[in-house]
Image: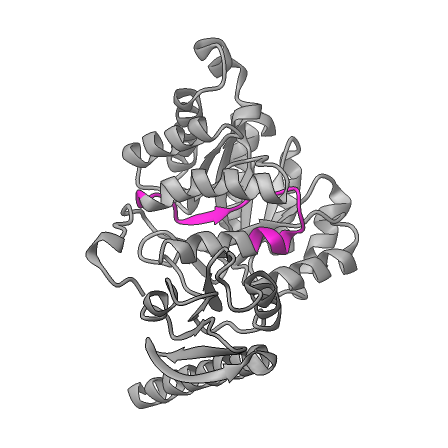
Amino acid sequence: MNYREYQQIDRRKSRQISVGNVKVGGDAPISVQTMTNTLTTDVEATVAQILRAEKAGVDIVRVSCPDEESTAALKHIIKRVNVPVVADIHFHYKRGIEAAEAGAACLRINPGNIGSPERVREVIKAARDHNCSMRIGVNAGSLEKHLLEKYGEPNPDALVESALEHAKLLQDHDFHEFKISVKASDVFMAVAAYQQLAEQCDHPLHIGITEAGGKRAGTVKSSIGLGSLLWAGIGDTMRVSLSAEPEEEVHVGWDILKSLGLRHRGVRIISCPSCARQGFNVIKTVETLEERLAHLETPITLSIIGCVVNGPGEALMTDIGLTGGGGGRHMVYAAGKTDHTIPEEQMIDHLVELVETKAAQIEAEKAAAKQAAE
């Protein structure tokens, strides 16, 4: 929950569509997506990867369908997972038709490489017949030839023009259950394209910086681009594209949303970088707490500060806090107020217990409120 007026973000008003049981756009929460990197034909490995992403909090998962064997496997994958599955289609329009028949919740097509307008129309028909939404996925690396000739190179104008051309094709066939992405690996190009597109239409937008890089560099790059857009109120669903396991993309996506106060899930730890004043090993403590509290989904804030310079102030804004003290004992805060001290050797187990107890209390209160409302 945000505390001050300057922390509020006014989201762009967009129309709402459905991706399976997940609403995208309108007043729906910004959803977090990822994509599997297993062979889709390996059903066991793909299902296992999706289930790990679900545990991390993913809302929607995309699966590549490059061949007929993959769309055949997709049917079995969808039956064994709990989140909507988007079929990623490139080059072969028939894969889109097969994926719709297999139960995909959404078809992601890149109009620049799927073929003629007639083939796109056939995919639209399959989506409508099987209650699929669609995503127009424009990418700077695969723009249509006529746009490259017109603009000379990929740029925001070309990305937006491509997106709106294909949006019109869907609309001309009275198909409106679609979202749009205009991704680029260049942060400036991607952000500028999304800003332009947001002004020119009300379709829900899937935002992302494509091919962002490895876990560290890609996280930084994605945070800059996605953070800029989300802060401006742009974006209805998002993927952090990393050369890393899908659950890592999910963790980073959630961290971006939590940092901006747009969604809240699990324990958000506020911690200092540590220095010579620290009363305990802050870095190791935070690493351990992140691991031991990862199973919680209830939104809770926890401050871990090594000394009294900033500890009391940070504790004012968190549910539970810890500040380093002297003599091997450290101060524990509850709801912003000093509560008790704890010996260092008991500190981590004690904090885990406090957070788990707080989470259980919050969930019990929510359940009681829901029951009373019924």
Pick the front one: 168 or 239: 239
Residue found at the far front of this picture: 327
- How was this image coloured? one colour
* Residue 95 x, y percent position in the rendering: 66, 41
- Residue 345, quarter of picture: bottom right
* Residue 251 x, y percent position in the rendering: 55, 56
Residue at image x 65%, y 59%? Answer: 50
Residue at image x 50%, y 55%? Answer: 273
- Taking 191 as reference, is 68 above or below it? below
Q: Indicate whether residue 109 is drawn in magenta.
A: no
Looking at the image, residue 149 sits to the left or right of residue 202; the answer is right
Quarter of the image containing the N terminus?
bottom left
* Residue 183 x, y percent position in the rendering: 49, 33
- Taking 41 as reference, is 312 above or below it? below
Residue found at the far left of this picture: 5
Residue at image x 58%, y 39%? Answer: 217
Residue at image x 35%, y 84%? Answer: 370
Q: Could you tell me if residue 21 is visible in this image?
A: yes
- Residue 286, quarter of picture: bottom right
Residues in magenta, as a range? 232-250
Q: Indicate whether residue 234 is drawn in magenta.
A: yes
Looking at the image, residue 121 sits to the left or right of residue 10; the answer is right
* Residue 126 x, y percent position in the rendering: 55, 45
Tag count: 0
